[in-house]
Image: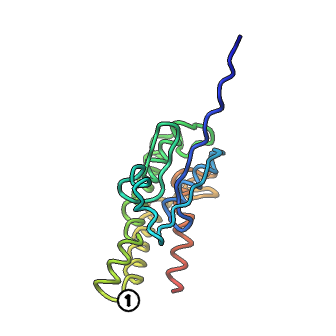
């Protein structure tokens, strides 16, 4: 008698609605059509410091993805994991030069723009330098990163940054554009 396999558990995303890193992962999950469970971690209430959450991400950052026995606590690593495990609707092109450019731009966003407006850093600047002093600094860092990205994609044609399909490099800026305009109008 054949036994029925239990359905695979859905991945669980620990996330905060205002986190740009979490936003990137939600975009990747949705673009790939992956059904997942959402678990909120309220950063303003300090829920990222809960000992149970720290087992998932010792850095106390969101997002964290639990997919079976895999636990990943970095948005870029999660996106690459999803790309490899769930190949439907690829986030990276097959062309090696375009793939490298996608990864380079994603790295700029993940290490050269996003961390520089992290809530922890913004609060630190406000405490050390003064209220309101973080906004011009954050604006300058975002502008610097986007200027670099704009220069890198010059000459790329299509509906999106590098063509007509949504891929890794094209999904990352969605949140940042809204953040950028928000900060410009502050």
Q: Which residue is drawn at 57% across and 64% down?
A: 174
**Residue drawn at the location 50% of the way across and 65% of the way down:** 19
Which residue is outermost to the left? 128
The outermost residue toward the top is 1
Location of residue 24 in the rendering, given as x and y in whole percent from the top left corner = 53, 57
Q: Is residue 114 above or below residue 168?
A: below
State which quadrant residue 3 falls in. top right
Quarter of the picture holding the N terminus: top right
Q: Say whether residue 76 is left or right of residue 174.
A: left
Residue that mark 1 sits on: 131
Nearest to the observer: residue 60 or residue 103: 60
Left or right of residue 152, residue 6 in this image = right
Residue at the spot 50% in from the left edge and 64% down from the top edge: 20
Q: Which residue lies furthest to the bottom in this view?
A: 131
> Where is 73 relative to 130, above or below?
above
* Residue 78 image point, x, y percent: 48, 47
Decide which of 132, 97 is in the foreground and name it. 132
Q: Which of 49 and 107 is in front in this view?
A: 49
Instruction: Locate residue 44, reporting x and y percent.
Output: 47, 72
- Percent across and percent down for residue 93 are 54, 43
């Amino acid at each position: 008698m054949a036994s029925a396999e239990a359905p695979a558990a859905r991945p669980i995303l620990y996330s905060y609605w205002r986190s740009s890193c979490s936003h990137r992962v939600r975009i990747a999950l949705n673009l790939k059509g992956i059904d997942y469970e959402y678990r909120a971690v309220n950063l303003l209430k300090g829920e990222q410091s809960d000992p149970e959450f720290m087992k998932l991400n010792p850095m106390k950052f969101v997002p964290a993805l639990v997919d079976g026995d895999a636990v990943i606590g970095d948005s870029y690593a999660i996106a690459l994991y999803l790309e490899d495990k769930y190949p439907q609707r690829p986030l990276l092109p097959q062309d090696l030069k375009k793939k490298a450019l996608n990864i380079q731009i994603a790295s700029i966003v993940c290490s050269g723009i996003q961390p520089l407006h992290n809530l922890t850093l913004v609060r630190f600047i406000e405490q050390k330098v003064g209220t309101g002093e973080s906004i011009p600094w954050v604006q300058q860092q975002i502008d610097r990163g986007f200027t670099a990205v704009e220069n890198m994609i010059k000459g790329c044609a299509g509906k999106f940054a590098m063509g007509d399909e949504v891929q890794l490099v094209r999904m990352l800026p969605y949140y940042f554009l809204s953040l950028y305009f928000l900060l410009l109008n502050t």
